[in-house]
Image (cartoon, rainbow, N blue to C red):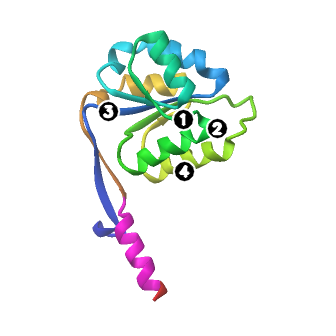
Amino acid sequence: MNNIDKVTLTIPKEKNIALIAHDGKKADIIKWCEEHKEILSKHKLYGTGTTARLITEKTGLTVKGYNSGPLGGDQQIGARIVEGKIDFVIFFTDPLTAQPHDPDVKALLRIVQVYDVPMAINKSSADFIITSSLMNEEYNHDVINFKENVSKRVKEMS
């Protein structure tokens, strides 16, 4: 790939953080948010349905809620990533319980990878991200130049 194939995106100093948890992990993410309340309060928080509501009720943090995960919330978070409106994701997953919306979760994971967005899937990875020195500064990262990629594909098909 040459330079035209990539575009640099900037994660700002004030992060847009998505908070998501499967039902079996909601108590864990609430406790985690309470432990990191001082840091989280300096950023904009978003979450899926019940998780967003519970974090707000239990911690006093303001979390903008989307739909519940099984009702499209994971897809809404993915769309915000594509739009550049979510900078990283904290998603406490429950690996021991089957999830009815597993395809939606996999789609979210794919978008996170495509757009090179940091994601934590458990308490330890969330602790590492939230305490990183990068939380206090801008961060530049390169992603595929989708506009150029589409143009090339159209030319190849013509």
- Res 12 seen here: yes
Q: Residues within 10 Å of mark 3 (few under 14, many from 20)?
A: many
Q: CA distance from mark 3 to mark 2?
A: 25 Å
Task: Write down the quadrant of residue 33 in the picture.
Answer: top left
Residue 2 to residue 124: above or below: below
Tell me, yes or no, whether the two marked residues, 3 and 2, touch with CB atoms within 8 Å: no
Closer to the N terminus: mark 2 or mark 4? 2
In this rendered view, identify the residue nearer to me: 38 or 124.
38
- The answer to whether marks 1 and 2 mark residues whose Cβ atoms lie closer than 8 Å is no
Is 20 included in the stretch rendered in magenta? no
The amino acid type found where label 3 is placed reads: Lys
Q: Which residue is mark 1?
A: 67
Packing grade of label 4 (10 A; few <14, some 14-19, many >=20) is few
User: Magenta span: helix, strand or loop, mainly?
Assistant: helix
User: Which residue sits at x=47%, y=54%?
Assistant: 114
Mark 1–mark 3 contact, CB under 8 Å?
no
Whether residue 122 is visible, yes or no, is: no
Residue 36 vs residue 48, the one in the foreground: 48
Horizontal and vertical percent position of residue 100 = 72, 38
Residue type marked 1: Asn
Examine the image and state in which quarter residue 108 appears.
top right
Which mark is first along the chain, 1 or 4?
1
CA separation, marks 4 and 1?
Answer: 20 Å
Residues in magenta?
144-156
Instruction: Read off the residue under disc 3.
Output: 15
Of the image marks 3 and 4, the number of the one nearer the N terminus: 3
Asked if the residue at tag 4 contacts the one at tag 3, i.e. Cβ–Cβ closer than 8 Å, the answer is no
Amino acid under label 4?
Answer: Arg
Q: Which residue is mark 2?
A: 70
The residue shown at (38%, 14%) is: 37
Task: Work out how far the residue at label 1 is from the one at label 2, CA to CA, in angstroms.
Answer: 8 Å
Q: Which mark is residue 110?
A: 4
